[in-house]
Image (cartoon, helix red, strand yellow):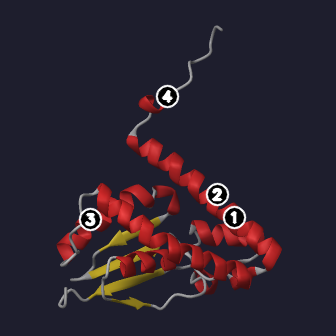
Amino acid sequence: MPGTRPLRTIEDMTREEVADLLNRCWMTHDGMWFFHCYKALGIEKASEINKAAIRSLAPMEMERIKKALGLEKRKIENEREFQDFFGAVSRLFIPDFMAIQFTYPKENTLRWDFEPNNCFAFKGMKRIGAVDGYECGVIFRLRCWMDCLGLKYRLSPEVERCLMLEDGKCSGEFEFDFSGS
């Protein structure tokens, strides 16, 4: 047919395009799963189930990621190893559309900052009318990752409910203790 382009194949896509597509599909599935739990069971039960799912997914997720990165036998023992590992993981699982930035403002500290009023979960919960009772699954997932890696840390602030509810901002820090690693 004149003027039509052939379909693109996965080989025609960049790695970033493939990762973005897979992450968007996964996050849409996750969002729709949460929406239907919320509609059927209410926000409290949906958040409880969401956190249980995240908690049970994290060990399998970390095992697969460590294996893919060649870390299956090693433990992360210092800040450099953590930064290398987390950098690789975030490139795979935390795409640009999530509007979150990670930095290392001081020794043994990972900081997260969402763009104001632009967390994908916050916007999704607002869209379905559940944001007032939503318990943050995003930072909870990061906590579960850290726990599965056996890392000692302090989270500031402690995150339960959505931080953006108060003033449209969500940021905080994981402060790690590598002394006993």
Instruction: Tell me what residue is drawn at x 70 percent, y 78 percent.
Output: 46
User: For the residues marked 3 and 2, what is the alpha-carbon distance in whole angstroms?
Assistant: 29 Å
Question: Pointer 1: what residue?
Answer: 33
Mark 1 lies on a secondary structure that is: helix
Q: For mark 3, what is the residue?
A: 72
The CA span between labels 3 and 1 is: 31 Å
Q: Are marks 2 and 1 in contact (CB under 8 Å)?
A: yes
In terms of sequence position, does the residue under pointer 4 or pointer 2 come before the other?
4
Amino acid type, callout 4: Thr
Q: CA distance from mark 3 to mark 4?
A: 32 Å
Disc nearer the start of the sequence (3/1): 1
Pick the front one: 44 or 173: 44
Whether residues under marks 3 and 2 lie with C-beta atoms below 8 angstroms apart, the answer is no
* Residue drawn 72% across the image and 85% down it: 44
Percent across and percent down for residue 118 are 57, 68
Residue that label 4 marks: 9
Observer able to see residue 109: yes
Horizontal placement of 176 versus 90: left or right? left
In the image, which disc is placed on residue 29?
Answer: 2
